[in-house]
Amino acid sequence: MKLLSNTTLFSYESINDIEKKIWKMGVDIPLHGSELLALDWSEIENSGAKFRGNFSRRIYVTLRNHEKSKENLNNLKDFADGFGQLIYLKEKMAVANTPLCSFEKCTVGNKELSWSFSDGHLYFDYVGRAGKPMRFDFSVLSEQGPEKISIYPIENSSKSNNFKLELFFNNCK
């Protein structure tokens, strides 16, 4: 994870509690120990998603104490909302044949995600509260799904805003 000028490498395991509508990611940070990042997506159709847990507090404090705190915190909120919408879409599409997506657009409540496919990447772009798109870039695609997701603002308005998260997926065997 790249956050401002810091890069943090960690291993993680995640699970989605469909009944409670909470996605949880347990991270193991070398020399720091284990922490939790939870994303409550239960209100994604109305007010948006919310991060919880000690890892989310770590991220929040880092962003809040930076000179571009407002821009960085907006990116964090847009990341939460966009990721929550993707989880919502995945779960809804798995249980019903409800057409939530059409040509280049998916709808969650009154919000939209645009999507495109190019050069082996599946892109979802979420336009957040500040009107700037947050990109969810799924790559190294296979029949089992993506092996990597990169999440970043498409246009950083300042060089000091280096919000980027990269997750690599593998399945335990």
Image (spheres, grey):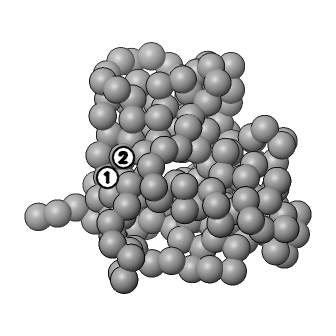
In the rendered structure, the answer to whether residue 49 lies left or right of residue 88 reads right
Q: What's under tag 1, amino acid-wise?
A: Ser
Q: State the CA–CA distance, disc 1 to disc 2.
A: 5 Å
Q: Secondary structure at mark 1?
A: strand
Q: Which residue is mark 1?
A: 14
Q: Residues within 10 Å of mark 2 (few under 14, many from 20)?
A: some
Quadrant housing residue 113: top right
Q: What's under tag 2, amino acid-wise?
A: Lys
Q: Looking at the image, which residue is at 62% across and 49% down?
A: 79
Label annotation for residue 168: none
Q: Looking at the image, which residue is at 58% across and 44% down?
A: 80
Q: Secondary structure at mark 2?
A: strand
Q: Looking at the image, which residue is at 59% across and 53% down?
A: 136
- Taking depth in this image into account, of 74 and 144 the one nearest to the observer is 74
Label annotation for residue 24: 2
Q: Which of disc 2 and disc 1 is earlier in sequence?
A: 1
Whether the residues at callouts 1 and 2 have beta carbons within 8 Å, the answer is yes
Instruction: State the residue lying farthest toward the left.
Output: 173
Residue 121 visible at all: no
- Taking depth in this image into account, of 132 and 75 the one nearest to the observer is 75
Residue 91: horizontal and vertical position, in percent? 38, 30
Q: Looking at the image, which residue is at 66% across and 52% down?
A: 76
Residue 96 visible at all: yes
Residue 108: horizontal and vertical position, in percent? 59, 24
Instruction: State the residue lying farthest toward the right.
Output: 157
